[in-house]
Amino acid sequence: MRQDLKASIGVIGGTGLYNMEGLSDIKEIELDTPFGKPSAKITLGRLEGTTVAFLPRHGRGHTIMPGEVPSKANIYALKSLGVRSIIAVNSVGSFKEEIAPGHLVIPDQLIDRTSKRDNTFFGNGIVAHIAFAEPFCPFLRGILYQAGLKAGASCHPKGTYLVMEGPAFSTRAESRLYRSWGADIIGMTALPEAKLAREAGICYAIIACVSDYDSWHEEKDIVTVSTITKIMESNVKLSKTIIRQAIKEMPRERKCSCGEALKCAIVTSPDAISPDIKEKLGLIINGYL
Ligand SMILES: [Zn+2]
């Protein structure tokens, strides 16, 4: 990768966040990876003195549904640009009265209820088991939370994000069940992104924007599409302010162990790994065999 096509921070935009205003020296780049093409062209630009790589998860014009997001290509492409930290923005529903529409959550935990997604770079002759007890980078989460407070957001410092397959929303019975499990918010896109980022040694954290109460909430006044759209617009605006602020605060050196996720995780003997796999996964596994 050319030196002028490098970025240390990646931003993955969710529903409503298809562009990042305020970037300067913009370059649009089309990348191909061993795992196919990413969701869209990646926009490289300078923001607060740092080069940022922006990628809209659902494609420009929102053409990709959650179960179709090419997460392996997205994470690989960002890794190939030198990205070490990813700030992701996700739209979610809330399971708690006190986490109201318009609020933001910096989740610390995940429950995986997806069923059809390719969630690892490994397999086909190479096996690795990463630690995932803490699925988000605690250091990056702290920066995002502080940036949220500075931006004046109603921001929750932690929460359990349940990832459903979709694309239909949950039934009321499912919504009540997930609430009983202790989940705080529900969305469709945090996984497999978070797992793949960890395998790739990239710090990853989410700004989850609450657009509605999930279907457990039997409100008398039915929420209309226009109220949800209004809330989402202000959520997106707020998350952009938080991203800017977080980038300003991001230190050059990482103070976490995300970059070492593959240390001791690959269990396959190096002699048993085919040259093809070594080449295909080189960007991710080099230094760990
Ligand atoms: Zn980290």
Image: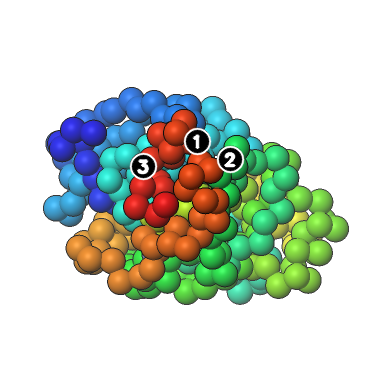
User: With respect to residue 37, does 87 lie above or below?
Assistant: below
Front of the two marks 3 and 1: 1
Q: Which residue is mark 3?
A: 283
Does the Cβ of the disc 2 residue fall within 8 Å of ligand 1? no
Q: Which residue is mark 1?
A: 274
What's under tag 3, amino acid-wise? Leu
Q: Residues within 10 Å of mark 3 (few under 14, many from 20)?
A: few
What's under tag 1, amino acid-wise? Ser
> Where in the figure is residue 85, as x and y percent of width and height?
34, 55
Helix, strand or loop for disc 3? helix
Instruction: State whether residue 26 appears in this view.
Output: no
Tell me which label, 3 or 2, sits earlier in the chain: 2
- Looking at the image, residue 250 sits to the left or right of residue 186; the answer is left
What's under tag 2, amino acid-wise? Gly
Instruction: State whether residue 248 appears in this view.
Output: yes
Q: Which residue is mark 2?
A: 125
In what quadrant of the picture does the N terminus appear? Answer: top left
